Image: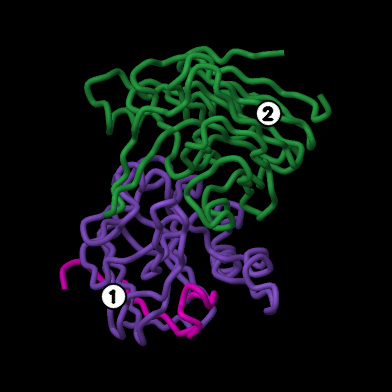
Chain colours: A purple, B green
């Protein structure tokens, strides 16, 4: 079943070890921030730093692994049509909007949307760290400066993540114009059993 | 007063808003992992992702700001003899040692040392995220691959951080050979009042 995340919103759901999460960009050039917790121990959560460390790369794509703060694999990326994602930057919050978009209304952003979604499972928002920003296109120049560019995903592109533990997953349709090429589109996702 | 952090160990201490933290590499080519919490609210802590986002760079040096997960400035970097640090990688834990140094005994690493030090203040270890790795020399190649190289710090080099809130700070002398050029030296630090 394909689930739709409306523009500028987020959801949380459970996934069992062995199941697959397919994150789909139905219209192209949209970003989905992904975060997750061990369903049985919320002190174990997705860790950008551990994942960068063990993958020895800031680039993620098919074959990359997403690790927890306790060094366990949470997701394997087993299929990826885009091969361009970001795992450096935190999800935008109201404060981020005030910083980068001072002329706009400060919306909850992916951080606020994830906080609301995870709160339904009793997870406090301060445990939300750096998200895996699916389809987000970030480039570093030779001086290490960060540039956020329009996503490379085309309509219908997707990434498939294989769950390696039981988890509560948060997923968003990006709210920040610079990240999604000022289009604010929806994101689709499916939770699938491995043997299709 | 100069405090000495012996090789492969860590400490935690308080600092008041306005005070300065001077982190010194007394012998050169050593790394000091830095992490911090708002002294009055442990749910506010150092955030690599927010800092990368607001500095718009993966390079940190004099003039850079270290932000919390709640988008507040925790430290300003006001003096820096090295201009080469890392804010991507998590502190090594026993699991990191098993991953990268399978032939060595798995020591607590900077993560374990920070966990012990922060526990004296009642801070649980799962709140320790990506540290600011003072003097750590990390390079990214054109494909985004991460290389850990010997630090650029020379004997006596230092970085001065100005505290922007009351904090509990954890600081280590690095335990990982690849990061400290296999020398395992001490780190010195001072907490100073601003008007010297």
Image coordinates of residue B43 in percent, x first then y, are: 66, 46
Q: Residue at x 40, y 68 (%)?
A: A136
Q: Viewer-nearest of labels 2 and 1?
A: 2
Residue at point 40%, 57% (across, down): A141
* Residue closer to the observer: A190 or B34: B34
Considering the numbered disc 2 on the image, is that residue within a helix, a strand or a loop?
strand
Host chain of mark 2? B
Work out whether B150 lies above or below B64.
above
Q: Which residues are magenta?
A: A174-196
In the foreground, B157 or B36: B157
State the residue position of label 1.
A158
Q: In the rendered view, tell whether residue B49 sits above or below residue B5.
A: below
Is residue A177 magenta-colored? yes
Where on the picture, by quarter, is residue B157? top right
Which residue is at 79% across, 36% downward?
B18
The 10 Å Cα crowd at callout 1, few under 14, some 14 to 19, many 20 or more, is many
**Position in image of residue B50 (x %, y %):** 57, 54
For disc 2, the neighbor class at 10 Å (few under 14, some 14 to 19, many from 20) is many
- Residue A154 on image: x %, y %: 30, 82
Which secondary structure lies at badge 1? strand
Tell me the distance, in whole angstroms, between the alpha carbons under discs 2 and 1: 46 Å
Q: Which x, y percent locates residue A176?
A: 54, 74
Res B21 label? 2
Would residue A26 appear left or right of A6 to someone viewing this image? left
């Amino acid at each position: 079943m394909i689930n739709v995340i409306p523009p500028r919103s987020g959801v949380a759901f459970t996934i069992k070890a062995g199941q697959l999460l397919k994150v789909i960009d139905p219209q192209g050039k949209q970003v989905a921030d992904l975060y997750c917790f061990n369903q049985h121990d919320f002190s174990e959560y997705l860790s950008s730093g551990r994942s960068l460390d063990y993958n020895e790369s800031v680039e993620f794509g098919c074959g990359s692994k997403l690790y927890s703060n306790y060094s366990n694999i949470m997701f394997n990326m087993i299929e990826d049509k885009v091969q361009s994602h970001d795992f450096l930057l935190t999800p935008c919050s109201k404060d981020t909007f005030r910083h980068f978009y001072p002329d706009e209304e400060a919306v909850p952003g992916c951080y606020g949307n994830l906080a609301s979604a995870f709160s339904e499972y009793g997870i406090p928002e301060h445990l939300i760290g750096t998200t895996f920003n699916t389809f987000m296109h970030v480039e570093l120049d030779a001086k290490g400066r960060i540039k956020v560019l329009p996503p490379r995903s085309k309509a219908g592109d997707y990434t498939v993540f294989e769950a390696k533990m039981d988890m509560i997953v948060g997923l968003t349709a990006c709210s920040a114009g610079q990240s999604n090429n000022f289009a604010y589109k929806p994101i689709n996702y499916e939770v699938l059993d491995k043997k299709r």
